[in-house]
Amino acid sequence: MFNNSTYQAARIVAPVVEAHFAAHQSAAKSRGEDEFLTSPNVRLIESLIDTAFWASLRREEGNSPKISLAFLPPDKAGNPLIFEQTIPFNSGNLTKLAPGVERPGIHLGVWHQNEELYIWGTTYNIPNYCFVLDVSEPGLLVIKHRRIFGFGKFVNIAVLKGDQIKVVDEDSAYLPDCPALLTSLLGFHSSGGESVNVLIQLAVSMRAHKQGGSLLVVPSRSDAWRDSILHPVKYSISPGFSALEELMQQADMERTKSSWQNGLSREISSIAGLTAIDGATIISDRHALLAFGAKIIRPLENAMVEKILITEPVVGVGAVIADPANSGGTRHLSAAQFVFDQRDALALVASQDGHFTIFTWSPCENMVHAHRIDSLLV
């Protein structure tokens, strides 16, 4: 196992990933947290990535594997399914097992003995800071861990696509005007709480339908946003549809029930699906659906947005000031104009190619800030 890996990106990123988990687990210990695991060392990380990469390029009955690997022993998993005999950890076995474990939430459990990796079974439940490696598509791997606060999307650490390596820059959370949605995606507890996590689920769902779309989040206390929408709105909702809002107002006890979780998933999928329709979908900051298929316009008395700040929370990627017309397609330009005119709103824009951008107003920079976050949503 300790021969040099043939996937060069595995050798490059393994020390960075080892340091990330070591830092977080050290911090957890200092806080007195006891639900954590020993993370894999650099050589095990390299082997996990190398094997998973080559498995991603194989096919089983014409299908590419989609697998989530969790590095933990069976006794640390919740209600695990344990194989009677362990299975050697290699690309062939991963490809064979993939069709049975590709559904969301299932992890293949991987552990080691005498520094030799093996597959012991499957689990839905893993502890905090558990090393997870997702095989998302051929040549695309995502290293992540479970979100510490709240439900939903795991926290991405690094994204590997072929020879391209993107290491998430956690320090982005400390930049001025960092929106709560981005802070939460980076794995930090945000002041937005569960409201922010709903937006994360909406972003993930918007990206998943691969048709592109725009979601505008407007303040419930004001109707000023209507000045930036062409009227009449063909698909206006009156009164606002409040199913998602009502779910988020239910007590904590209700949220542990499968009926609540299924309802939440259904409403998020429904709203995200509407974003595929031409025009923007509009919700309030309390998650009430207000309209879809809406056309964004510039109020006559307002100037056109001339420049935006573009950033991506990836190590080594700097901020760029650009013409909004060069930041993407029509959706991006109209979203930038909307936020320029409605500075207490935000816009989420998904591209058909998988890119995802959050547009917010930055008081510090006095301009629209485009946060490219597709590396956090994979």
Image (cartoon, grey):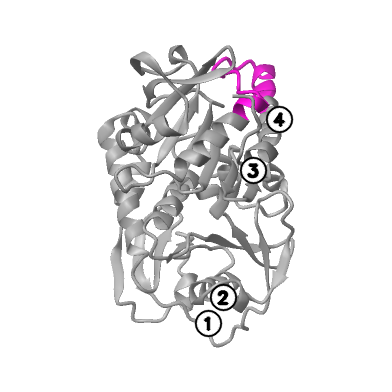
Cα–Cα span, label 2 and label 1: 7 Å
Cα–Cα span, label 1 and label 4: 48 Å
Name the residue rendered at 58%, 12% in the picture: 114
Which residue position holds label 2?
337
Helix, strand or loop at label 3? It is helix
At label 3, which amino acid type do we have? Answer: Ala
Mark 4 vs mark 3: which is more N-terminal?
3
Q: Give the range drawn in magenta.
A: 24-45
Name the residue rendered at 36%, 58% in the picture: 209
Helix, strand or loop at label 4? It is helix
Which residue position holds label 1?
298
Q: Do the residues labelled 2 and 1 touch (CB within 8 Å)?
A: yes
At label 1, which amino acid type do we have? Answer: Arg
Q: Is residue 219 left or right of residue 235?
A: right
Cα–Cα span, label 3 and label 2: 39 Å
Mark 3 vs mark 1: which is more N-terminal?
3
Cα–Cα span, label 4 and label 3: 16 Å
Disc ID at residue 374: none
**Which one is in front, 188 or 303?**
188
Which residue position holds label 4?
19
Cα–Cα span, label 3 and label 1: 46 Å
Which residue position holds label 3?
9
Q: Is residue 320 left or right of residue 150?
A: right
Can you tell which of label 3 and label 1 is closer to the viewer? 3
Name the residue rendered at 53%, 42% in the picture: 142
